[in-house]
Image (spheres, rainbow, N blue to C red):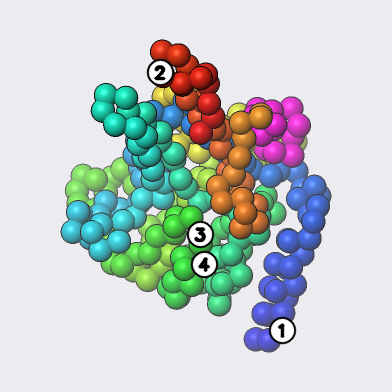
């Protein structure tokens, strides 16, 4: 047993060596443009449908037992009628120095070769350590073995498992779609094309606020957006190195709005 743990520990340590991801073909990254997000919630619904996430009643949500993998934070500035609202979609940040990976006692969460923070469901024993270590509050625990009433059970995604009671889960960047794209590219002896992989949230966003792609490709759209002057990462001071990049919203505070011009927030 000690030998197995040592090999896993050595592997996790290797994944954190600076420059490690340059040795691999893909480094999946998401860019969220807050100037485009209107808080419609389409990404939340699409994520729930794609990833077989159960619907939790209001009473359970009041006990902090919500199951959504992505949430929309709303921030209100000013008073009526001069009110400005900003929406921020928050999902697993796929941190490159993830605290949850360090905290899990059974190595149920680890970094894979594409730079994703993945979860091994049948290894998870539900200690809650990863959720406690996560500064973004994006991990969800299955308090029950949830059921889908007919005919809702017929809409479950066959490409993804249904998690049972006692298992922690979270956003995976729709890893099942990434695997399909990688298999297709392998069969055709090529690399995955930019835009070929789209997680459910990206595909469903009506305003194009979400962009997904390979950060290792300098010509990819996410790479170009990552170089935008508005870019930032959530809680950068914690040095978690998230793979989700946000573009600041530009608020109009010109003369008509009683301000001095455009301002990023």
Which numbered disc flags the more N-terminal residue, 3 or 2?
Answer: 3
Which numbered disc flags the more N-terminal residue, 2 or 1?
Answer: 1
Q: Which residue bears the numbered disc 2?
A: 257
Out of 156 and 15, give the one closest to the viewer: 15
Residue 113 percent across, percent down from the top left:
69, 54
Out of 81 and 237, give the one closest to the viewer: 81
| Label 1 – label 3 distance at C-alpha | 31 Å
Say which of marks 1 and 3 sits in front: 3
Q: Secondary structure at mark 3?
A: loop
Q: Against 85, is 241 above or below?
A: below
Answer whether labels 2 and 1 touch (C-beta < 8 Å).
no
Is there any visible trace of residue 175 in the rendered image?
no
Q: Against 32, is 20 above or below?
A: below
- Picture disc at residue 133: 4
**What's drawn in magenta, residue-wise?**
214-227
Answer whether labels 2 and 4 touch (C-beta < 8 Å).
no
Residue 79 percent across, percent down from the top left:
29, 31
Q: Secondary structure at mark 4?
A: helix
- Picture disc at residue 49: none
Q: Secondary structure at mark 1?
A: helix
Answer whether labels 3 and 4 touch (C-beta < 8 Å).
yes
Q: Secondary structure at mark 2?
A: helix
Say which of marks 3 and 2 sits in front: 2
Which numbered disc flags the more N-terminal residue, 1 or 3?
Answer: 1
- Picture disc at residue 135: 3
Quarter of the picture holding the N terminus: bottom right
Please tell me which residue is depicted at 56% across the width and 33% down the height of the picture. 247
Please tell me which residue is depicted at 31% across the width and 43% down the height of the picture. 155
Which numbered disc flags the more N-terminal residue, 2 or 4?
Answer: 4
- Picture disc at residue 3: 1
């Amino acid at each position: 047993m000690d030998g197995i743990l040592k090999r896993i520990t050595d592997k996790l340590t290797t994944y954190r060596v600076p420059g490690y991801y340059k040795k691999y073909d893909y480094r999946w990254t998401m860019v969220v443009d807050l100037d485009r997000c209107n808080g419609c919630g389409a990404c939340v619904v699409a994520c729930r449908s794609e990833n077989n996430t159960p619907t939790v009643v209001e009473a359970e949500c009041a006990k902090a037992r919500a199951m959504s993998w992505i949430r929309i934070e709303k921030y209100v500035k000013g008073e009526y009628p001069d009110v400005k609202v900003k929406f921020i979609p928050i999902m697993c940040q796929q941190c490159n120095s993830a605290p949850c990976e360090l905290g899990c006692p059974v190595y149920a969460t680890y970094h894979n070769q594409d730079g994703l923070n993945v979860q091994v469901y049948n290894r998870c024993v539900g200690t809650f350590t990863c959720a406690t270590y996560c500064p973004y509050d994006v991990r969800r625990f299955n308090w029950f073995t949830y059921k889908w009433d007919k005919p809702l059970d017929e809409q479950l995604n066959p490409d993804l498992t249904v998690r049972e009671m006692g298992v922690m889960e979270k956003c995976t960047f729709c890893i099942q779609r990434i695997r399909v794209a990688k298999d297709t590219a392998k069969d055709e002896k090529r690399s995955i094309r930019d835009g070929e992989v789209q997680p459910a949230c990206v595909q469903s966003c009506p305003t194009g606020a979400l962009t997904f792609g390979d950060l290792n490709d300098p010509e990819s759209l996410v790479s170009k957006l990552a170089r935008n002057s508005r870019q930032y990462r959530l809680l950068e001071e914690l040095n978690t190195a998230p793979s989700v990049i946000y573009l600041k919203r530009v608020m109009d505070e010109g003369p008509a709005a009683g301000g001095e011009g455009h301002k990023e927030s």
